[in-house]
Image: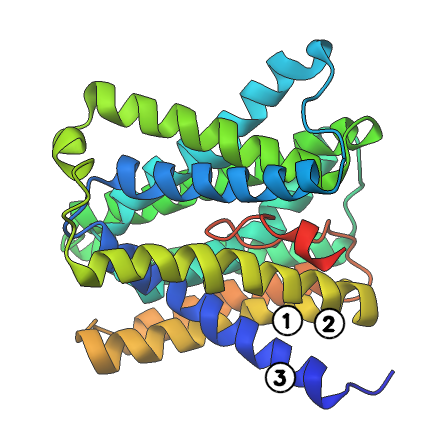
Amino acid sequence: MKATASQRAMFVFICFVWGTTWLAMKLGIATVAPGVFAGSRWAVAGIILLSIRRFRGQRVLPPPRLWPRLLFVSVLLVTLNQIIQLYGLKHITAGLAAVISSALTPIALLCFAVGLGQERFNRRQVGAIVLGVSGVFVLFGPDALAGRLDVWELFGAAGVTIGCLCYCAGSVMTRPMMRTLEPVQLAGLTDLVGGVVLLASSLAVEPGAWASMRFDWGWPSFLAWLYLLIPGSLLSTTMYFLLVRDWGASRPGTYAFISPVIAVVIGALLFNEKLEWANGLGMALMLSGAFFALSKGAAVPAAAPAPQRLTAIALAE
């Protein structure tokens, strides 16, 4: 199917916006407590989605039997994913965080789907995992062997990785729930529940959380919050699912190889984020692994990357 001009424009928009969301998050958490910055955004996103359903006369609340599972997957998808990733982001560049997330997401989705009996491995998928792991060793192995490893950078990369794994596990665990809940309903509920749990936890234990609730963030952080909510979540995810509908799952998924490059380039040009040849090689290997995981013949569930999540399917219906 030949792409129309509007479809190409939507794809370019997605690649650019999702290539800059990590930079917006890094900008926001520089002055705002990460739990408040993320929790408030996801709670608002959930309220928007559920309000749309209510306005259309559609059901909002799930059956009582699903509440325990809903709470569990919401904490995985939003609460743990966001707080662990954002604290990790404090110690690595936005470009590296974007590469880790984009490369790891399709591979981790596959592994969890296989572990839960939803899919099976094939040789292509094994090769994807080998490439991804090789990229991690290229990124951190030389410094580790030479005794120059930056422990805080390693901590940051581990945080982004663990947060991404929480998201992927939660994503796979939501699939059985879609036999009862509509995708829009499930997205709104997980956003709202996960966001509220994150916000409440932040106010209970996170340093600076109550001060952040005064919302005197300064215009850069506030604009970053709005950017993550509206273009980063609502608009881009709507466009993504429109493309999945019109193009199929694999073609729109190639954003995963373009948006990290945008993040790296913008980070280097505007924020002086370092990029050495070994970093570039490691990133290339990780993205190659993602390519094989997403390419035809490797069945991986379609999913938006962790920072955006599936928050705007309602707008595409």
**Callout 1 amino acid:** Thr
* Relative image position of residue 204 (x, y in whole percent): 23, 18
Query: Quarter holding the N terminus?
Result: bottom right
Residue extending furthest toward the right: 1
Q: Which residue is mark 2?
A: 251
Disc on the earlier residue, 1 or 3: 3
**Does the residue at mark 2 contact the one at mark 1 (Cβ under 8 Å)?**
yes
Q: Secondary structure at mark 3?
A: helix
Depth check, front residue: 69 or 126: 69
From the viewer's perspective, is the residue at label 1 or at label 3 nearer? 3
Picture layout, residue 188 above or below residue 252: above
* Relative image position of residue 227 (x, y in whole percent): 38, 62
At 51% across and 56% down in the image, what residue appears?
233
At 48% across and 65% down in the image, what residue appears?
231
Relative side of 248 to 276, left or right = right
Mark 1: give few (<14), some (14-19) or many (20+) Cα within 10 Å: some
The quarter holding residue 247 reads bottom right
Find residue 9 and name its label: 3
Mark 3: give few (<14), some (14-19) or many (20+) Cα within 10 Å: few
Q: Secondary structure at mark 1?
A: helix
Q: Secondary structure at mark 2?
A: loop
Label 2 and label 1: CA atoms lie apart by 6 Å
Q: Which residue is mark 1?
A: 254
Label 3 and label 2: CA atoms lie apart by 14 Å
The quarter holding residue 124 reads bottom right
Question: What count of labels does the image hold?
Answer: 3
Relative side of 55 to 45, left or right = right
